[in-house]
Amino acid sequence: MSHESIRLLKQCARGELRARVAQLTIEDRAHASESIVKHIGSAEIWTRAKCVLLFVPFADEPDIFPLAAIALARGAEVAVPRVESDGRMSFRLLASLDAGAWTKDTCGVRAPEGAEVGIGRFDFIAVPGVGFASDGMRLGRGKGYYDRLLASLPVETTSVGVAFGCQIRNRLPVESHDARVRWIATQAGVFASTLA
């Protein structure tokens, strides 16, 4: 299949998955987010992690950011992605949940201004996506930030795709640069991808 055909299939899949999420009410999203936080918070892959990377959600993504307070309370380090002015994604330690310790990055997303840390430090990485497949394949927003991150992770790092249940498909269109996650978390629970 041609590169252009795969891109078209991805575009169609993004449209379908975004439409599914758009059908969820605010209450549905909030309830599902709470369930996802509960499932991740009780999973061994989370409780043993000493340094975690979380994301600040867009409106159409599960809000798992309450996990930041949980991690900090148990003495774990928490970092958040930040897109820098040179276009790269850095990872900044979260020193405080206080809104005054945050600014917006070049994409307009809230991010802390803490010290930058390398990917080798993370035990657990939460990965957003427009959709996921049961084999761990991820469909992102098309910028490639998380594909590059996932491709460069040490093998021992736990990567967890986070999504609403309606964002999970049996298969997704794949290109050679696309990367997989090892685990998937939805409101139904946390499970290993079939290619973990």
Image (cartoon, helix red, strand yellow):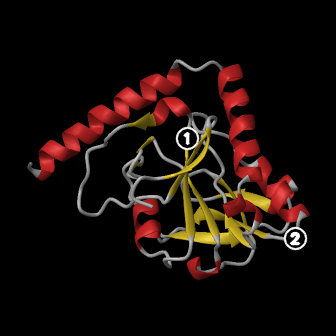
Horizontal relation, residue 48 to residue 187: left or right: right
Q: Is residue 25 above or below residue 105?
A: above
Q: Residue at x 61, y 59 (%)?
A: 105
Instruction: Label 2, secondary structure: give it.
Output: loop
In the rendered image, residue 103, in percent from the top left (x then y), is placed at 72, 58
42 and 137: which one is in front? 42
**Residue 28 falls left or right of residue 7:** right
Q: Residue 110, position in %: x, y?
A: 68, 53
Give the percent coordinates (x, y) of residue 162. Answer: 57, 47
Kindly check if marks 2 and 1 are in contact, taking CB atoms under 8 A apart as contact.
no
Seen at 32% across and 34% down, the residue is 13
Q: Give the CA separation, mark 2 to mark 1.
A: 26 Å
What amino acid type should be assigned to the residue bearing mark 2?
A: Gly
Q: Is residue 192 above or below residue 154?
A: above
User: Nearest the camera: 188 or 143?
Assistant: 188
> From where the camera sits, is residue 160 visible?
yes
Q: Secondary structure at mark 1?
A: loop
Residue at image mark 2:
75
Note whether 44 is above or below 186 in the view shown: below
Could you say where residue 146 lies in the image, as x and y percent from the top left?
46, 60
Q: Is residue 3 left or right of residue 14?
A: left
Q: Quadrant of the C terminus?
A: bottom left
Q: Quadrant of residue 111?
A: bottom right
Q: Residue furthest left?
A: 2
Residue 87 visible in the current orientation: no
Identity, as a three-letter code, of the amino acid under mark 1: Ala
Q: Residues within 10 Å of mark 1 (few under 14, many from 20)?
A: many
Q: Label 2 crowding class (10 Å Cα cut-off): few <14, some 14-19, many 20+?
A: few
Q: Which residue lies most toward the right here?
A: 73
Residue 163, disc:
1
